[in-house]
Amino acid sequence: MASILITNSVPTDPILRQIPRRTAKWCNHRFLLCPNGNSIDAWVVYDNLLKPETNRIERCRTMLITAEPPSVRRYRSAFTSQFGSVRTSHASVNHPHLVRGHEAQLWHFGMHPCRTHSDILDYDTLAAMSPPKKPKLLSVISSNKVVTEDHRQRLRFVDQIKAAFGDQVDVFGRGIRDVPDKADAIWEYKYHIVLENDHTDYYMSEKLPDSLLGWSFPFYSGGAFADSVFSTASFARFDMYKPAASIATIQSHMQNDSYERNLVQIAEGRRLVLDELNLFAVLCNAYDSMNERLGTNNRRSNRTSPLTTLLPKKKSVRLSMQRFMRAISDAA
């Protein structure tokens, strides 16, 4: 069993809740948030570091997983080049050991206590949940951000949804109608509208997985990745830039009782979220692939491994600039 250290850009997130403790056998490695003197076999940075950090590990056994979409953040080579491998949806990122794919975004459903559930929901609790009674029809979550064009279109589309469905739809989101946890905006609803703020091919946020974890039938406006993993009967695709056609799609599915008709497919979608798209399932596979590439026989003991320092995005850029200026000065 390998010990894998995870550094998360939001250290308060209860990410270890996504690890199965009793009900799944695929998690065959140990994950740590702090080494505490333990020997580590890999070091994963999720999105970014808050400060420079040093651990005794070979650099080739470090990995970056990006989190923010291309429309919101750029991960420059000054930052990504310090890692042994990179997993990202960003087409602009280049690295000799690159996996272009989804980033296994952390679930937000069940992350905080709320009205729907009084405690944080871990993997085993989520896996054991049966479809609840759904007294309400339709919900959508949209913050009031207007940074990108997708943000702005998302707000325009929500206004059109409210005009079309009236009191049949409930709108939630930061700056609009805050909820302590997304479960309060999903669990009671048969249908949930998912509006991504980026439509890059490999990018998929937590929004679609959250809907499936809440046993709601998702209407999805987002990138193409979802089509490659989920059954077309487990969600319905629409384009928020085509509001008339999108509203017709939503109306048609609700009139045809797609939620009740497709509960089996929703259940399979939940299984994929829990057991295959889960960050820790992705990391187990990534570690095994890394070991195959590097060779386990070449693994140094923790005592002989070098000290490796990883820098946060801004500091890594500053260091690269300092090296560049020093090289120019030396050449002169």
Image: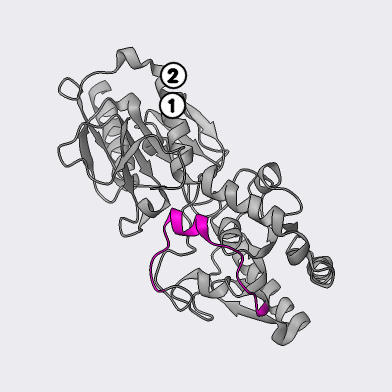
Residue 168: x percent and y percent?
Answer: 72, 83
Could you say which is closer to the camera, residue 147 or residue 170? 170
Left or right of 200, for residue 275: left
Answer yes or no: is residue 264 visible: yes
Residue 134 painted magenta: yes
Residue in view at x 38 percent, y 54 percent: 17
Q: Please, which residue is most extreme toward the bottom here?
A: 167
Residue extent of the magenta highlight: 118-136
Disc 2, SS: helix
Residue in view at x 73 percent, y 64 percent: 240
* Measured Cα–Cα span from mark 2 to mark 1: 6 Å
Q: Please, which residue is most extreme toward the top here?
A: 297
Quarter holding the C terminus is top left
> Splitting the image into 4 quarters, where does residue 170 fall?
bottom right
Disc 1, SS: helix
The type of residue carrying mark 2 is Glu
Residue 173: x percent and y percent?
Answer: 53, 74
The type of residue carrying mark 1 is Asp
Is the stretch drawn in magenta largely helix, strand or loop?
Answer: loop
Residue 247: x percent and y percent?
Answer: 80, 71
Label 1: few (<14), some or many (≥20) within 10 Å? Answer: some
Label 2: few (<14), some or many (≥20) within 10 Å? Answer: few
Could you say which is closer to the camera, residue 70 or residue 283? 283
Q: Are marks 2 and 1 in contact (CB under 8 Å)?
A: yes
Left or right of 57, for residue 204: right
Residue in view at x 46 percent, y 65 percent: 110
User: Circle 1 is placed at which residue position?
Assistant: 288
- The relative height of residue 176 versus residue 84 in the rendered view (above or below) is below
User: Circle 2 is placed at which residue position?
Assistant: 292
